[in-house]
Amino acid sequence: MQRAAYGLAQAVAREVKSIRKLAGASVTVLAGKGNNGGDGLFAAAILARRGMRTTAVLAAPAVHQEALAAFVAAGGRVVQLEAGNAEELAVLSAGSDCIIDALLGTGARGGLREAPAELVASLQELRPRLVVACDLPSGLDANSGEVHWPVLDADITVTFGGIKAGLMADPGEGCAGRVELVAIGIERSLESISPELRRLTDSDLGTLLPKPGRRAHKYSRGVLGVVAGSARFAGAAALSVHAAALAGVGMVRYLGPQSAAQLVLARTPEALWETDHSGRVQAWLLGSGVDGEEQLQRAKEAGALALADDLPVVVDAGALSLLPERCPAHWILTPHAGELATLLNSLPSTGEVKVTRDDVESRPLHFVRQAAEQTGATVLLKGATTLVSSPSGVVFNQSEGTAWMATAGSGDVLAGVLGALLAQAAESIRHDDGAYAALCVDPADRWAALAAVAASVHGRAGALASADFDGGPITASAIAEAVPRVIGSLSAEYDPTRP
Ligand SMILES: NC(=O)C1=CN([C@@H]2O[C@H](COP(=O)(O)OP(=O)(O)OC[C@H]3O[C@@H](n4cnc5c(N)ncnc54)[C@H](OP(=O)(O)O)[C@@H]3O)[C@@H](O)[C@H]2O)[C@@H](O)CC1
Ligand SMILES: [K+]
């Protein structure tokens, strides 16, 4: 507890010092009855000894006794939250330079209630200057990221021992601000526990990104078959094919109506327009912008071929209604929240109660796992934080993008990037050359890991494209154009171990 409190106090002191002098600055700790409140009070005691004006708002009649005694001994002021004074204390708290939210931690059941809920709801409206959450924002479920409102949005969450899954999955991640990890001596014992969620780092991405061998040629690099776009949504075809080409695929075979093919070839002359399914491919991308009987039929035929040949497939948008009864794990579905709700409702196993888009947005981790388990496919749920669930229940998540990426065509670019990675890795991933094993990714979860690589590359490309405009808005085309730079920055030019 002392290590946790010290780490929390250090983070608060650093942040306050970036705005004003520490001595004389004010901090209010909102303290609940459990050890989370204890951490907050011990941290505030350290800050009081460093010259800060400290106030503790006690949210329960009895709080951590030792921590309260330390706080009082350090000169802290104590006020008791009661029915009737929540608004007054919200105004008092919002006037301080920093608020530490230590109401509830990992021992919470459900969210804030009664006076603490009123206090936090009022505070949220008052927009405090700086909020630091102790371990996690109070009201957030540490294991799932589900949120019991009201929650005080944090600028920084200082979390102890390990990053909780709830800080990496929406909507929780959206309330947590920047997450900082403080070591408290339990890290070794956590190593044997398999994590609820995995996030790939720069070096993981560098390891898993497919790279050509030195004597590679276009066919050995992987060919992607694409059934995307339609006369109505020709742009989706152009974007997904272009993104696939930029993500390093050996070649793209495009199947679709002439009007869409013209746009595809104008944008990506490297692609081939095919009029039947006979050309060899290593992976398929089906569905982005697919509309109308004729193009749906092409997607269906490609899906049947992929099943027969045991090839990996990206199943996007319009093709999500074409799933076989049971998909293999190397079929990667890429729905957004609304599409995932529709997909779940179409499955016989979902039952009577319909899933809505709001349900998926409130419990994305739960529903992405459910979809993967019920379909047998790997499911990539698009969002500010993208979650990828393997049918085994192992979930990866990546969150490198920017809000500007919520723009038309962004999903088509992601589908293209993922298709390109699948085509390149289709062979090597099955007999892992060591890369997946080195990262402790089970064979069953390799497809999910590769999909997470695609989500990360896409997110990073969006962030990079926006940075080119000083953080300004971007188009889906700009995301695609940034993909080679992201891949270049993460991986070597070629793999010396491959022919
Ligand atoms: N684990 C570790 O190794 C370390 C943990 N550390 C710290 O401990 C924190 C976990 O502490 P914790 O277990 O005391 O839980 P916490 O959330 O503070 O209090 C829960 C208490 O409140 C109550 N309560 C429950 N729900 C409620 C609700 N909705 N509304 C109101 N009350 C509610 C419930 O009491 P009950 O009502 O059951 O009597 C329960 O006893 C963790 O987040 C981290 O900060 C660090 O110091 C480092 C080492
Ligand atoms: K907290």
Image: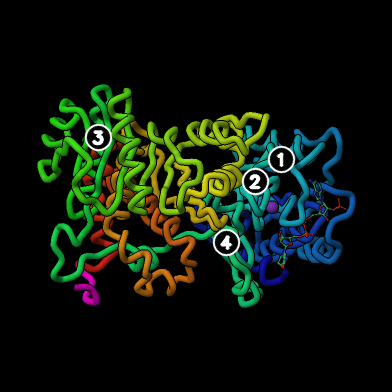
Mark 4 residue type:
Ala
* Secondary structure beneath label 1: helix
Query: Residue at left 69%, top 35%?
Result: 121
Closer to the eye: label 3 or 4: 3
Q: Is residue 160 above or below residue 235?
A: below
Frontmost residue, 322 versus 339: 322
The stretch of residues the image draws in magenta is 494-499
Which residue carries the number 4 mark? 11
Name the image colouring.
rainbow
Residue farthest along the right direction in this orientation: 61
Residue 26 makes an appearance in the image = no
Residue 237 tag number:
3
SS class, disc 2 = loop
Residue 13 visible, this orientation: yes
Question: Would the CB of label 1 be found within 8 Å of ligand 2?
Answer: no
Q: CA distance from mark 4 to mark 2?
A: 16 Å
| Mark 3 surroundings: few (<14), some (14-19) or many (≥20) residues within 10 A | many
Answer with mark 3 or mark 4, whichever residue precedes in sequence. Answer: 4
Q: Which mark is residue 96?
A: 2
Task: Decide: few, some or many residues near mark 4? Use Cα within 10 Å; few <14, some 14-19, many ≥20.
Answer: some
Residue at the spot 41% in from the left edge and 49% down from the top edge: 331
| Residue 226 coordinates in the image, percent (x, y) | 26, 41
Q: CB at mark 2 closer than 8 A to ligand 2?
A: no
Give the amino acid at mark 1.
Leu
In the image, residue 247 above or below residue 302: below
Asked if disc 2 and disc 1 are in contact, CB closer than 8 Å, the reply is yes
Give how far apart the Cα atoms at labels 3 and 1 are: 56 Å
Q: Are marks 3 and 2 in contact (CB under 8 Å)?
A: no
Q: Residue at x 76, y 42 (%)?
A: 112
Q: Which circle marks residue 92 in the picture?
A: 1
